Image: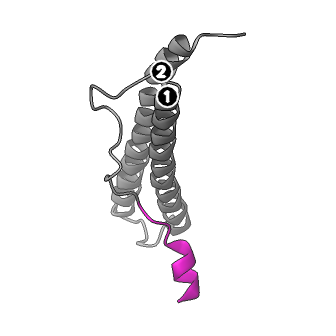
Amino acid sequence: MSMTITAAAARISRQLPEAELSLDSALLASTRLMESMLLARGAEGVQVYAAQNALMRLAKTQRSLIETQNDMIRVHRDLLDAGREVKAIGDDAGNCPDQSVGLLVEVEPARQQA
């Protein structure tokens, strides 16, 4: 199936924000879950360390989601550059990430060296 550059740019411009928002939604949902898990540990008769492994895995999942958000910002920037290169789009509305927007740096390798 073939489509024009204009049609492809229009499709991508609709789908990219949806993908970005879905990552936000996943992070919010996991945060609500963590809150519920922590509140449940405060219930009478529940030991303080109950479900600690599950909490640790959820925290790891949240970190992965944040790293994925960083990658999605990079995807957005790359698509913007590609769209400009083929003269399919501009960013008149200012909806694209600015190059000066800070991204999380990967700190795991630095931790392993320490």
Q: Nearer the viewer, residue 60 or 18?
A: 18
Which residue occupies the extreme left position in the image? 93
Horizontal side of 5 relative to 33 (left or right) equals right
Q: What's the mark number on residue 113?
A: none
Residue 29's spot in the image, x, y percent? 41, 42
Whether label 2 touches label 1, CB < 8 Å:
yes
Where residue 30 sits: x, y (%)?
Answer: 43, 48
In the foreground, 24 or 97: 97
Q: CA distance from mark 2 to mark 1?
A: 5 Å
Write the start and end of the magenta stretch as one range.
104-114
The residue identified by callout 1 is: 83
Q: Amino acid at mark 1?
A: Gly
- Let me know if residue 113 is in the magenta part: yes
Residue in the foreground of this view, choosing between 60 and 111: 111
For the point 42% across and 65% down, the residue is 46
Describe the element under mark 1 as helix, strand or loop: helix
Q: Which residue is mark 2?
A: 88
- Mark 2, secondary structure of its residue: loop
Q: How many marks?
A: 2
112 relative to 103 in the view: left or right = right
- The spot of residue 1 in percent (x, y) is 72, 10
Q: Residue at x 49, y 43 (%)?
A: 72
- 4 relative position to 21: left or right: right
Query: In the figure, residue 105 lies in which quadrant?
Result: bottom left
